[in-house]
Structures are given as structure tokens and as C-alpha cells.
Image (spheres, rainbow, N blue to C red):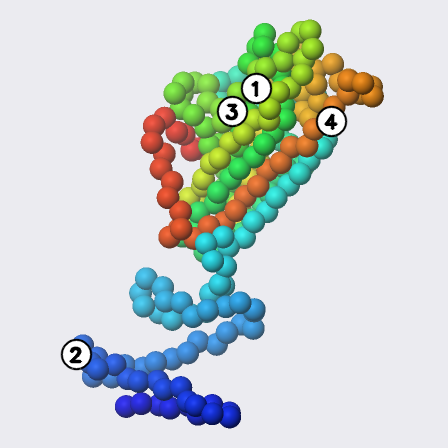
Amino acid sequence: MTIKLNGSTAGSVALDAPASTTGNADISFKLPVADGSANQLLKTDGSGNLGWAADGGSILQTSLRLDGTRANYAEEVDGNNFTDARNLSGLSITMTPTDATTIFLITGNIYVTHSPSFMGKGFVTTQISGGSEQMIAGNGDSSHRATFPISDGDAGTGWTGTGKNFTLFYDHNTTSAVTFRVRVATSNPSYYIFYNRDENNATDDSDGCSMISSFMVQELTSSSFTGVDNNNIYRGT
């Protein structure tokens, strides 16, 4: 059977039935009702159900934060108590996944420095609404996890060099809102973390410098992404 739709001025479009229904006596073809949103397409799920979905390509949504705050912080983290670290609130992002199968790609460029006398630590964390905050960190030393180190100043000049860069991913398996944070801490509160500034906080015209830190989260379709935790990666509290 063929259903033919004639064009308003010329030509036609035909909808043909399949040659076989593979043993099923009757098959119904039902179009779901769209919610009126723009840029939607018809999509089947894993059970063959047809529904409307956003046509976002491989990148479904992106959120970016830029922060030029100049500050110094003395929050101390011993071992793995990362929630004691300072939350860089100007970089926090909350995003609700399009569906549970997508992947979050997390990137950042954080300008922080710290005296090399003791180690500073940076943490990238995730928190599903109603759940516990978790860090994405190295697990080579399971007693002292961190996402990135902070230790490149010196007592003479105390300038930060290049930003602390990272590229991470989060396979969330939820449709609840997820909050992403960057936290920083010191191993000794006598040695500060310096954020978007140098250790000496120079502000004069000939030697001053103020930096911008950035943090971005993108939601990607799982079919467009490949990511593997090969060795010694920790994701948890």
C-alpha cells in the first residue's frame, strides 16, 4: 500500500508500506506529538519507540565561566578531604543532562600559584543533585589524590606561569542536574594559594598582572565520544 501526498503546486511524496512485517500481523505507525520546541527530530530509543528529540548534533549544550577574581586562599587539605578546599565559586557550573546516556567533557585553564616549599592541590569535582560531591583525580598515591598540582612560585618573584590545564570527562548516567566545581587548597596554611595574581600581588604599571581563569563543560552524545580511564584514575568521594 502506498500513501501519496500531493504537493501544493506540483509533485508528490509517497509513503510506502514495508515489503514484509516479519511475522507480525499488524504494525501501527504512530507519530508522537512534538512539544513545540525548535530544531527537533524524530528519534528511536533502544526499544524501537519513536519520539521527538533535540537536534543538537554531537554537542548538545555548552557552559563556560570566566573569572578574573584576584585572591589568596589558605584552606588546607590533608590526605583526601577535598571538600575542605576552597571552591572557586566564580567558575562553578550546573547543567541538566539532555538524557542519561550523554557524556560531559570538562576543560579548564586555572591561573594559580603556590610556594614550592609545600604542595598546593587542585580538584575538579562533580555533584549530582541530591548526591555527594565527588572528585576526578589521580590515584597513583591513594592517600593524597588531586586533579592537578599547584607549586611553581618562589620566594623571590612568586609569579605564576602558564595556567593549570585539564581535559576530563564524566559519564554521569542521570537526568538530574549536575554541578561542576574547581577547588584549590594548600598542604600548609602558612603557604597560600594565589589565584589570578602573583605571590607578591604586584599591581604597579611596570610589573603588575591580572589573569583570567576559565572553566567549560560540554554535553556530548555518547556516539560521538570515546574516553577511557586507562590507569590509576579515581572518581569518588
The reply to whether residue 184 is in sight is no
Q: What residue does disc 1 label?
A: 150
In front: 39, or 46? 39
Q: Amino acid at mark 1?
A: Ile
Q: Earlier in the sequence, mark 2 or mark 1?
A: 2
Q: Amino acid at mark 4?
A: Ser
Residue 211 against residue 58 in the figure, above or below: above
Q: Amino acid at mark 3?
A: Phe
Q: Earlier in the sequence, mark 4 or mark 1?
A: 1
Q: Residue at x 46, y 54 (%)?
A: 58
Marks 2/3: CA–CA distance: 59 Å
Q: Residue at x 64, y 9 (%)?
A: 154
Q: What residue does disc 4 label?
A: 210
**With 56 as the anchor, is 213 left or right in this view?**
right
- Residue 118, given in percent of the width and then of the height, sits at 57, 10
Mark seen at residue 23? 2
**With 41 as the anchor, is 192 left or right in this view?**
right
Q: Check whether the beta carbons of the residues at disc 2 and disc 1 lie within 8 A of each other.
A: no
Marks 3/1: CA–CA distance: 7 Å
Marks 3/4: CA–CA distance: 21 Å
Which quadrant of the figure contains the N terminus? bottom left
The reply to whether residue 103 is in sight is yes
